[in-house]
Amino acid sequence: MKSRIWLPLIILVLSSLACSVCGTAGKAIQLGRDAATVASDAATTVGEGAIATIVAETSDEAEPESESEEPGADDESIPQVDADAMSEFDSYRVRVVSHWTPEVGDAEGMTMEQAHTRSPAAQQFIIDMGEDVQTEFVQIGDQAWYCSGGSCTQTAADAEELATGFGDSMALDPSDVTKDADAKFVVRESMNGVQTRRYALDVSEAQAAILSQGDMADLQSNVWIADEPGLPAYTARFEMSWIETRDGETGKSEFFYDVYDVNASFTIDPPEGAESSGLPDDVPPYPNTEDVFSMEGMTTFNSADSVQTVADFYRDALPAQGWTDETDEELGDMVNQVWKKDERTLNLMVSPSDEGSSVMLSIE
């Protein structure tokens, strides 16, 4: 399948996402393995005819206002971007779109969306391969969700790492392509809500090879560098197009990178379906937990408290929420409880661990 050309990039991105939930190391490793499986399945599912959907288009992107300016002697140098520029923002979004349209057949491609807010600390990352094949990762404070195929996994995450990593981009950094390219100033213009300086780039095939899976020709590229008081110099937009031949088929490839909604007011919410991954409202969360992990009606966590302390908590708390005790038995050092409410069954298993107890709650 031609769509498999995106698989290495997708696995790289999803592996980064998996590492960001390292508060539960073992589960994060499994999450990374599952992410790679999801990416492979997505590539197979999409097949030929997949094309990325470009979302959240900015109004000034199509026809940016511009003012002519004669380039000076220093305008033909490579555009300089401030190091860690996005770490100075309060919020921002990044969109990456890449697609290939063969002369015969359907277009294929993918879209990656990234969003960050500093207060509250949150991030979102979406990979959309079209035809409802979408993977989403959201972290808000110390909670993270990974959703794909209509189901979500929830786990504890490192809130401190989220804060210190603000400004990092998981998407391709255009400087990987532009850092050694010759540049020529074109015009000042508004792009993605900020004033920028636009440069035409002379990018070689070797420099652009990271974005290609075949032979390249007629390579064209532009970059827009922010040039607005109060903001660092960052890449507001980068675009590149070329004619590409893959396995004997010729088509047009296009790549777009946009940074937008800089310092805008927006909120990152848990993904749709996330409510099904945690405990329902009538199951009280245990107050002293760590390494919480939830998925499709099942929640596990560790506690420094003893098995009996945890079991006693639920013996007192669940009846107050309308649950009826069906089974409460001790199996060696473990406690197994079964609770009923209407048509639902709650299974609670508490077992000893080296540092207290391990708990598994499941609802059917």
Image (spheres, rainbow, N blue to C red):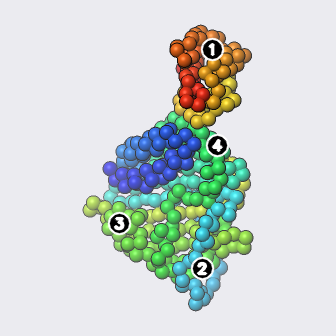
Image coordinates of residue 3 in percent, x first then y, are 37, 52
Q: Write down the residue under mark 4.
A: 142
Instruction: Rate crowding at label 4 as few (under 14), some (14 to 19) or many (20 or more) other CA atoms within 10 Å.
Output: some
Q: Image point 63% across, 19% down: which residue?
A: 308
Residue annotated with mark 1: 341
Between marks 4 and 2 in the image, the one whose residue lies nearer the viewer: 4
Farthest-out residue, front:
354
Residue located 56% across and 77% down the image: 79
Q: Is the residue marked by circle 1 packed among few (<14), some (14-19), or many (20+) residues within 10 Å?
A: some
User: Residue most toward the top?
Assistant: 326
Q: Earlier in the sequence, mark 1 or mark 2?
A: 2
Compute the Cα span from label 3 to label 4: 44 Å
- Other-residue count near label 3 (Cα within 10 Å), few / some / many at <14 / 14–19 / ≥20: many
Percent of width and height locating residue 241: 44, 68
Local secondary structure at mark 4: loop
Q: Secondary structure at mark 3?
A: strand
Q: Examine the image and state in which quarter residue 265 appears.
A: bottom right
Tell whether label 3 touches label 2 (CB within 8 Å): no
Q: Which residue is mark 2?
A: 187
The image shows residue 295, relative to residue 326, as above or below, that is below
The answer to whether residue 61 of the structure is visible from this angle is: yes
- Label 4 or label 2, whichever comes before in sequence order: 4
Q: Amino acid at mark 4?
A: Asp
| Cα distance in 3D space between marks 4 and 2 | 44 Å
User: Which residue type carries mark 3?
Assistant: Glu
**Lower sequence index among marks 4 and 1:** 4
Residue occupying image coordinates x 50% and y 51% = 16
Q: Amino acid at mark 1?
A: Lys
